[in-house]
Image (cartoon, rainbow, N blue to C red):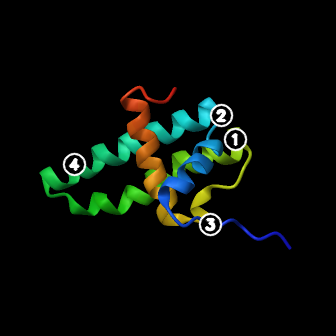
Amino acid sequence: MKTEARYQSFAEFYPFYLGEHQNSICRRLHVIGTTIVIAVFIYAIVSCHFWLLLLQPLIGYGFAWVGHYFFENNRPATFTDPWFSLLGDYKMWWDVVTLKLRW
C-alpha cells in the first residue's frame, strides 16, 4: 500500500505543489478561480452580501478540480495536504501575477 508523503513545512511542500501544476491549462484554471475567489470575497465584504462567502469553496475548488481531472490528470493535493494546498494555491497565484511563474 502506497503512503502519501507528509510535508513538515510549506517550503518543503511548495516544489511538490508546483510539480502537480505543470499543465498550463490547469495552472490557468487555478489562477482564474483564485482571482474570482478574491474578487467575490472583496465584493461580499464591501457590499455586506456575506452569503456570497458560501460560494468560495465551490468557485475555488471547481476551477482547480476541473484542471486536475481533465488536464493535469492527477489527484488534487487538497486531499492529502489541505492547508498546504490552500497556501500553495495563493502562493502560485501570487507568483503568476507578479510574473515569477509562467501562466
Name the residue carrying label 1: 72
Name the residue carrying label 2: 23
Name the residue carrying label 4: 42
Which residue type does callout 4 highlight?
Answer: Ile
Q: Which residue is pictured at 52% across the width and 26% down the height? A: 102
Q: Which residue is pictured at 65% across the width and 34% down the height? A: 23
State which tag comes first along the sequence, 4 or 1.
4
Which residue type does callout 1 highlight?
Answer: Glu
Q: CA distance from mark 3 to mark 4?
A: 29 Å
Residue 58 in the image: state x and y as whole percent.
Answer: 46, 56
Q: CA distance from mark 2 to mark 3?
A: 20 Å
Residue 39 position (above or below residue 58): above
Is label 1 in a helix, a strand or a loop? helix
- Check residue 62 in the rendering and tell me which mark sits there, or answer none: none
| Residue nearest the viewer, comparing 11 with 80 | 11
Left or right, residue 53 beside residue 93: left
| Residue nearest the viewer, comparing 44 with 99 | 99
